[in-house]
Amino acid sequence: MNEQNMISNLRQSNGKYAIESRHLNVFYGSFKAIEDVNLLIERQKITAIIGPSGCGKSTMLRSFNRMNELVPTAYAEGEVIFQGVNIYEEDIDPVEVRRRIGMVFQKPNPFPKSIYENVAWGARMNGYKGNMDELVEQSLKNAALWEEVYDKLDQSGLSLSGGQQQRLCIARAIAVRPDIILMDEPASALDPIATLKIEELMRDLSEKYTIIVVTHNMQQAARVSDFTAFFSMTPDRTGVLVEYGATNQIFTNPRDQRTEDYITGRFG
Amino acid sequence: MTYAPTKSNSTVNGEFNANLSRRHRIARIWLIVFQVSTVIGIVVLTALLLNIINSAFGYVVIQNQIEPEELVLDGVPLEEQTKEQLVSILKSNISAGLFKRLENDMPFAERTRKDVYNLVIERVVEPTVEKTWSLTDSLFRKRQVFAEAAGEFPDGYITFQSWIDPKFVTSPQSSDPERAGVRTAILGSLWTIAITLLFAFPVGVGAAIYLEEYAGDNTINRIIQTNINNLAGVPSIIYGLLGLAIFVRAMEAFTSGSLFGLVDDPTTANGRTILSAGLTLGLLILPMIIINAQEAIKAVPNSLRQASYGLGATRWQTVWYHVLPNALPGILTGTILSISRAVGETAPLVVVGASTFITLDPEGPFSKFTTLPIQIYQWTARPQDEFRNIAAAAIIVLLILLLTLNASAVLLRNHYSRRLT
């Protein structure tokens, strides 16, 4: 059985969690970036990853769809279970993993192509056989961008404003029908109004998708997320998961002293 | 005026010595150094161009071997004679061998009267350049030039000659400087460059893609990279020797065309063909194309690759649809600049075996060849003055060719850059 069928069959299995890491360590060469992370991500919820700079938040996020492997020296130990399968198994193709677990980056990075092509390209590369116009329209509508761009789909994606570009990147990500969307500080390069739009969009998307978001902005984590994972680092700069729970609980009643120091601004 | 507040932190505790006038003076000195460097560059370039133009134009004294008045037949001046009369003049004044050759080129029965008249002027009247003057002499010592010409050549007449003209560009090579042109050399250069491009561009860009997008950072790849960087600095004559050993000698069957049965007589050119020359120049510019293409590929923002991978694209899809289109302007610019260098190369082609004298246009990759710089090199080595003049004219042709190439590089780059943003 090839790995695609394997994933499809297991997709129906009614696991409670969208994705989970088990004893995950990630290394860059000899440097251990994160250590022994066990994280259970709930389905169709927004999970925020917060923590001080350099604590391995982005590394954690990227290990969920094997994007870390693009760094030549990076490798992972442990398991990431997605739909019942460890995505780090040898017979799993990272290309297929990345289609199912999409990604939105810190800085909006639309392709230097038309708005239409930006959305259609990923789907076409993955062999989408349906009606492309409908897919583009639906994806742009789901990304709350359709009203602003429907009359200029042939213009360059780079002609849009920063906030629009970021929503275009979200439309591009959902056009390949992922199950999970990873967002790496998606609003940190945007102004407050554009940030608000992205946050509203994340709430809307969480009805259909599981979202994991890395953010530096604690108000944002408090506003938008259902669950929060707080990462910190050991003296040798290795990231560790300190506390994980419902956002309400983390922000109002943290169990760990380090979490409390961080969210009240005494550290970070 | 120096800004000097009566009381501020720095003046109170005296930690700073602003010394503004000295800092500005140093800045001015450096500015002058930079300006002088620029001026030196411009002066050298101007001197080069003036030197070439100086030889390519100027007064010449022309003397006819037989005055047209001597060819008057039955009281009819040369200009009004019939075609048959002109043919008979031609026949009685030139050697039988030359007459036969002209007949072979095109039978006299088929030639027009004007054509025959031109032949009589060219071969019988035979206006010959006796002495030439440079452009500066022609402009600033005009009177002395005319006096000198009248004194030395009372039968001759003086005229202003532009050594570069349409006839010079369209005529084949000739042993007579007044009839010689650069058509053979231009065609040879174009053919050679076409082969060079066909070989070096795909190989170079392919190697650059592999090294930048696929190859890991290990010892072997670092050695390869260092080697490529060093190859770019190897003197071109070494490439000529390499080309001689590989393409002309070892691969003679391939480069002479006999492998494909395309040449009946493999002894004429052996491996010293356009194909050998093009491949040799291809080897020469390959490292430059690779390095340029690598730089262009490096300049593609990593965020684009990440976006592509994040959508579930394979490495090849990422390279083909995002990296290459975005690197293309840089790759093309680098390629055209390398091609410009190859167009001007002389030394490796001398070694590979450029023909010293061919009057026939190259017919394909298996023809013998000469190129513009080879032609210039050979003309400057001849003793007669006029060859220096036509060498200068050929240099102008070469410079125009290079300028066209560089301009097209800029246009291509602008075209693609605009399309991408």
Image (tube, coloured by chain):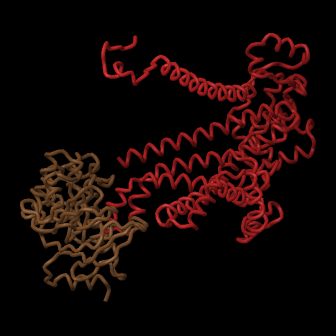
Chain colours: A brown, B red
A28 or B244: nearer the viewer: A28
Looking at the picture, tell me which residue is in the foreground, B230 or B288: B230
Place residue B268 in its image quadrant.
Answer: bottom right
The part of the image, by quadrant, that contains residue B351 is bottom right
Q: Residue at x 84, y 39 (%)?
A: B381
Can you see residue B184? no
Residue at image position (11%, 58%) is A224
Decide: is A152 above or below A175: above
- The answer to whether residue B23 is left or right of residue B6 is right
Residue A249 occupies which quadrant of the picture? bottom left
In this rendering, position of residue A68 left or right of residue B239: left
Image location of residue A67, percent across then percent down:
33, 67
Q: From the top left corner, tell me how far across and down residue B312 is, in percent.
A: 31, 69
Q: Residue at x 9, y 59 (%)?
A: A251
Which quarter of the rendering shows the N terminus of chain B?
A: top left
The residue shown at (67%, 51%) is: B233
Left or right, B211 with respect to A45, comes to right
The relative height of residue A141 versus residue A74 in the rendered view (above or below) is above
Q: Position of residue B37 (x, y in %)?
A: 61, 27
Q: Is residue A89 visible?
A: yes
Q: Nearer the viewer, residue B166 or A51?
A: A51
